[in-house]
Image (spheres, rainbow, N blue to C red):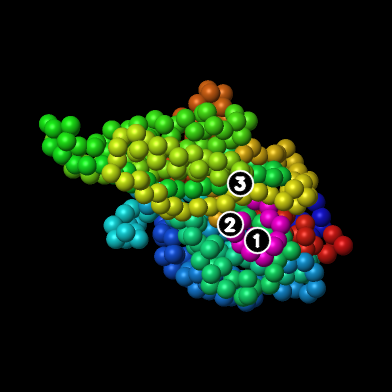
Amino acid sequence: MTKAVVSVLAGLEAIRGQVEDLYRDLHAHPELGLAETRTAARVAERLRAWGFTVTDGIGGTGVVGVLPNGSGPTVLLRADMDALPVREATGLPYASAAVATDRSGREVPVMHACGHDVHVSCLLGCARLMAQGRQTWRGTLVVLFQPSEENGDGAHAMLRDGLTDRVPRPDVAFAQHVLPYPAGYVGVRPGPFFSAADNLRITLHGRGAHGSMPQSSIDPVVLAALCVVRLQTIVSREVAATDPAVLTVGSLHAGSGPNVIPDSATLELNIRSYNGATRARILDAIRRCVRAESQASAAPREPDIETLSSSPPTSNDAETAVRLDRAFRAHFGAAADTIGLQTASEDFSEIPGAFGTPLCYWGIGGIDPEQYAAAVRNGTVDQDIPVNHSPAFAPVVQPTLDTGITALTVAALDWLACDQE
């Protein structure tokens, strides 16, 4: 460990209780994407109090704090702020009872089911420690709090609102995510980390008729069933087994009654991949399959294929990841390791991509270590450990928060510390 890391982290004990209180408050008051007004206000208030120059309202609710501290590198640290339309089932005393109106006008329950409250709390904790320890480092620290990661449009919204012209260009950009690993764990890897994600809506067209007269119809329900089966062969038969990919039909809607053959059916698909060639191949195969099945069913017209959202793959700069892995192992010891590929997706990479900046993204654990160890012994990790987006996902407060604050601080100081010169 460098002297700077030791010096800055010496302040963690004094702020730990405040960070924990903030985390519980954020968890109890989650907000949907682009509606994170309460969260953003609390972030901006604290950053200003600690001496950051704050720009808020970027892309709607995004907040950026800039702390210049002499000549040196510029490091960007990012946290996402939004929650999910999930009804919490953790039983925690600070569990969310929030409801909100989503973008379609529906009233939905809201929960921090992906740990973004952890991310915000950890980055604020790191920001405060870095502000208190300015004598140990030189350069510029940029802390970015992004809206609407879950919808895949928050990074783009900030960029569209002129982010690259409103903050210094970073030399390196970092982010982290709490994941269903034992709390205290830190894992990074060079190259691919999170997958690309594409969400599609496919509308299949038929001809409606009475349920007793199928000969007068072109049944889109049968067509949809054939498409679901055919789509499952794309990954299993057109993608190499050594090339990870996932295709899920997550939604199928058709008809309004048992005796009416409808005019159309709608599928919604989610595709995960790790490289551009595989991504393009899967998307092309989807179009080919649903068009061919429609033609085979004598559909009156070709299906409509709409892209609902897309997120690029998150791929860590190899040199940066190796350097950061070395720093994590030096500080965390055996708790730091090389993390495996993650099939979740992120839009964070759009931000360093717009700056032309190398990025590195890592994972921290959030599950009670004894609970996790017991599940490993029993071979029941998949059954017993709640994952992100589950209504039961509840990272333990400690050592999760300490680990997240420390990892961000170690990463920033590995570039900014005076004793790195």
* Residue span colored magenta: 348-362
Mark seen at residue 276: 3
- Would residue 366 be counted in the magenta stretch? no
| Classed neighbour count for the residue bearing mark 1: other residues with Cα under 10 Å, few (<14), some (14–19), many (≥20) | many
The residue at which mark 1 appears reads as 352
Residue at (44%, 68%) from the top-left corner?
37
Indicate left or right for 157 with 294 as reference: right
In whole angstroms, how far apart are the C-alphas of marks 3 and 1? 18 Å
In this orientation, which residue lies closer to the viewer: 368 or 352? Answer: 352
Residue at (44%, 64%) from the top-left corner?
34
In whole angstroms, how far apart are the C-alphas of marks 1 and 2? 8 Å
Marks 3 and 1: which is nearer the front?
Answer: 3
Q: Secondary structure at mark 2?
A: loop
Going by the numbered disc 2, the residue's amino acid type is Phe
Q: Quadrant of residue 302?
A: top left
Which mark is first along the chain, 1 or 3?
A: 3
Confirm whether residue 54 shows in the render.
yes
The residue at which mark 2 appears reads as 348
Q: Secondary structure at mark 3?
A: helix
Q: Secondary structure at mark 1?
A: helix
Going by the numbered disc 3, the residue's amino acid type is Gly
Indicate left or right for 216 with 418 as reference: left
Residue at (35%, 38%) from the top-left corner?
295
